[in-house]
Image: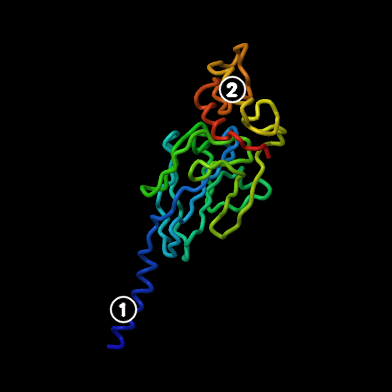
Amino acid sequence: MRRGLTATALCVGICATAFGGGHTWDVNEVFSNADGTIQFVELREANGTPGEIGTGGKLVSSDGLAHSFTIASNVVAPTSNRHLLFATQSFADLPGAPTPDQIIPVGLLPFFNTAGDTVRYGAFDAFTFGAVPTDGINSMNDGGIVAANSPTNYAGQTGSVDASGGETGCVGDLDDSGTIDLADLAGLLSAFGASTGDANFIEAADLDNSGTIDLGDLAGLLALFGTPCP
C-alpha cells in the first residue's frame, strides 16, 4: 500500500514535468533596425503558469516573409511570466543587449517585415502589427504599443539597446522638432504617393524604405504619433 502511494506521488512529480505544456507563451515584443539586420522577437509566458516547459520543437514564424525557425529546446520550470528572447547575432553584439536564448539564422534576415507582419508562436499565438519603428530605439509591443525596446531573456536579464547607428533624428520626426506631431503628418501627406526621384519625394517620410510614400508609411507615422524622440 505504501509503495503504491509512493509510486503515485512520484508520478505526479515526474509526469507533471515530462508532460508540461508549452501553449501559454505569447509573442510579446518585436524590434528591428532599418535594414532588418538587427531584430529580436520576445515571447512571454502569459498565464503565470509554472509548468509551460514544452517549447522545444515549436515554430516561431512570420507570415509576411514566410520565415520560420524551430525552438531548439524545452525550458526549465518554473516558467511563470518568464520571457524567451530570439535575436540576430548583430543584436547580441550590441552593448547592453541581454544574451539571446537562441540566435535567428542569418539566412532568415530580415525575419519579419518591418512594414507590417504577423509573427506566430506555433499554433498558439499570433501577433499582427503594422509598421514597426526602425529608429533603432523603439519596439512594437503586444497591443500595438510603441516604446523603448526592453528585451528580456529566460534568465531574466533585461536591457535596452541603441541600434540607431548614431543618427541624431528619429523615424517619423520629419521636421526634427523632437516629437512626432501634426506637422510631421502634414509633411508626409504632402508627399503622399511620391516615389524616389520625384520632386516632392521626402526621404524621411519613407518610413519603411520602400521607395514610395504610401499607406505603410502613413500607418507607421500614426503608430508613432505623439511619441517624443529619444
Question: Disc 2, disc 1: CB below 8 Å?
Answer: no
Q: Looking at this view, is 66 or 221 the one in front?
A: 221
Q: Residues within 10 Å of mark 1 (few under 14, many from 20)?
A: few
Q: Where, by quadrant of the figure, is residue 166 drawn?
A: top right
Alpha-carbon distance for marks 2 and 1?
A: 67 Å
Q: Amino acid at mark 1?
A: Thr
Image check: 21 left or right of 159?
left
User: Looking at the image, is 89 positioned above or below residue 197?
Assistant: below
The residue under the point 27% across, 88% down is: 1
- Give the color scheme: rainbow, by chain, secondary structure or one colour: rainbow
The residue under the point 62% across, 37% down is: 227
Q: Looking at this view, is 160 or 88 the one in front?
A: 160
Helix, strand or loop for disc 1: helix
Q: Earlier in the sequence, mark 2 or mark 1?
A: 1
The residue under the point 37% across, 49% down is: 124
Residue with the mark numbered 2: 188
Residue with the mark numbered 1: 8
Q: Where, by quadrant of the figure, is residue 164 drawn?
A: top right
Nearest-to-viewer mark from 2 and 1: 2
Q: Disc count in the image?
A: 2
Q: Amino acid at mark 2?
A: Leu
User: Looking at the image, is 77 positioned above or below residue 70?
Assistant: below
Q: Position of residue 45 (x, y in %)?
A: 46, 56
Q: Position of residue 78 (x, y in %)?
A: 47, 65
Residue lying furthest front:
182
Helix, strand or loop for disc 2: helix
Q: Looking at this view, is 185 or 24 the one in front?
A: 185
Q: Looking at this view, is 46 or 52 the one in front?
A: 46
Which quadrant of the figure contains the C terminus?
Answer: top right
